[in-house]
């Protein structure tokens, strides 16, 4: 049976670190509030001259190196992002050019923080359907450029970075076992960027009204996230006739430590099964799961045959899960 297997992981983050103590000097907040309410201690911020494609390309290069796959062999490049280099062309096309992945089809998807799981699902279907044999799925963001650094409700939450995987058609039992994707557009106003699209184009008025920045109703998002992520995790397990005790490692979207802990508790997972790195990176949206995956993988936390569960939730609203036998 042909399955889609993750054969390489990679990640890249900016060098520049912005700590909670730095934020104390920028807005009315404290390290104590941020740490206890979110679990975040610091985040990475892109420097001038660094773009979403910069980190996407670096992460992809590292994933290709681990997989032992040349860029020229890649059939498909999917970049999940809500902070593309340009409205168009797709950041995936810039990555294709940077890598020299000449035969690849390349496009972006905008599914916010669920983008990586969405991309993985699309690549899995392309591979099992036979239209691609080797693909790159990348989650990459430079959210710092759409954050209002005077808004304490949002500025402390987000960070920049990228994660990538190489996926390949393989025979056998190892690989992606299932993906489940969901959305509910009736909640679109809970988390969005009002400006720079066709409703509020990038003109002076949009800038003056500060509509270029991300806005979020954090409390509402929080409640919906816990329920939706639990549902998506259980759906993945039920589809594969598994139970939470079969999970070797749970890699959830990294938005808030309290959300992650609540889902871990509902699933009955010990802390040793739940991978958390948001203390160092904050919420990197589409990059968060592949960034955590790469850290866990390179840190020796994932072994052949392990059951790995990805669980995502974000603006849209969008959410979903992917279950993998490593
Ligand atoms: O990635 C996509 C999904 N995104 C998420 O999942 C984010 C989900 N939401 C969250 O993570 C949380 O809702 C936040 C971290 C954004 C906010 O935490 P909260 O526990 O929901 O706090 P809150 O907004 O209810 O505010 C509690 C209190 C308020 O004061 P009062 O009214 O109780 O006196 C706020 O004014 O904390 C105050 N507050 C702050 N204090 C210090 C809000 N922001 C800050 C701040 N520093 N930065």
Image (tube, rainbow, N blue to C red):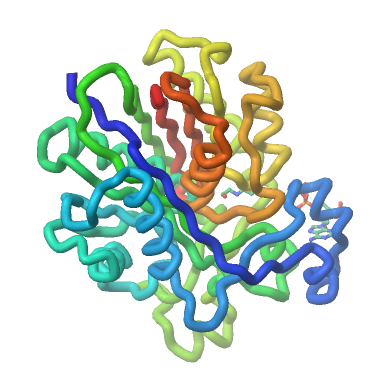
Residue at image point 26% right, 31% down:
4
Q: Nearer the viewer, residue 249 or 7?
A: 7
Where is residue 65? Give x, y as percent: 35, 51
Q: Left of 69 or right of it: where is 239?
A: right
- Kindly indicate the quadrant of the structure image that contains residue 235: top left
Q: Left of 163 or right of it: where is 262?
A: right
Where is residue 74? Give x, y as percent: 20, 51
Residue at image point 53% right, 85% down:
207
Q: Left of 180 or right of it: where is 252?
A: right
Where is residue 15? Give x, y as percent: 61, 69
Q: Nearer the viewer, residue 123 or 180?
A: 123
Q: Left of 167 or right of it: where is 128?
A: left
Q: Nearer the viewer, residue 170 or 192?
A: 170
Where is residue 13? Give x, y as percent: 54, 62
- The extreme bottom residue here reads 204
Residue at image point 44% right, 31% down:
321
Does any portion of residue 110 appear in the rendered image? no
Q: Is residue 321 above or below residue 132?
A: above
Does any portion of residue 6 appear in the rendered image? yes
Q: How many marks?
A: 0
Residue at image point 40% right, 26% down:
326
Q: Is residue 306 above or below residue 281?
A: above
Which quarter of the image is occupied by the N terminus? top left
């Amino acid at each position: 049976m042909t399955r889609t297997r993750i054969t390489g992981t990679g990640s890249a983050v900016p060098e520049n670190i912005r700590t909670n103590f730095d934020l104390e000097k920028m807005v009315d907040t404290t390290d104590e509030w941020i740490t206890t309410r979110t679990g975040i201690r610091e985040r990475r911020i892109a420097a001038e001259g660094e773009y979403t494609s910069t980190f996407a390309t670096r992460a992809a290069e590292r994933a290709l190196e681990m997989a032992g796959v040349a860029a020229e062999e890649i059939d498909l490049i999917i970049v999940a992002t809500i902070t593309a280099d340009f409205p168009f062309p797709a950041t995936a096309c810039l990555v294709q050019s940077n890598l020299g992945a000449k035969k690849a089809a390349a496009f972006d998807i905008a599914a916010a923080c669920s983008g990586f799981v969405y991309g993985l699902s699309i690549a899995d279907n392309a591979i099992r359907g036979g239209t691609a044999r080797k693909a790159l799925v990348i989650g990459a963001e430079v959210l710092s450029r759409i954050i209002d650094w005077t808004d304490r409700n949002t500025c402390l939450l987000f960070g920049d970075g990228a994660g990538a995987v190489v996926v390949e058609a393989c025979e056998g039992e190892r690989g992606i076992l299932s993906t489940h994707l969901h959305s509910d557009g009736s909640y679109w106003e809970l988390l969005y960027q009002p400006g720079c699209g066709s409703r509020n184009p990038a003109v002076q008025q949009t800038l003056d009204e500060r509509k270029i920045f991300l806005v979020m109703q954090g409390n509402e998002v929080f409640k919906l996230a816990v329920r939706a992520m639990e549902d998506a995790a259980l759906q993945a397990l039920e589809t594969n006739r598994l139970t939470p005790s079969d999970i070797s490692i749970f890699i959830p979207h990294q938005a808030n430590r309290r959300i992650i802990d609540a889902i871990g508790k509902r699933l009955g997972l010990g802390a040793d099964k739940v991978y958390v790195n948001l203390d160092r990176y904050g919420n990197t949206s589409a990059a968060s799961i592949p960034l955590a995956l790469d850290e866990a993988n390179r840190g020796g936390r994932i072994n052949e045959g392990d059951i790995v569960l990805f669980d995502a939730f974000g603006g849209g609203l969008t959410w979903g899960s992917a279950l993998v036998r490593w």
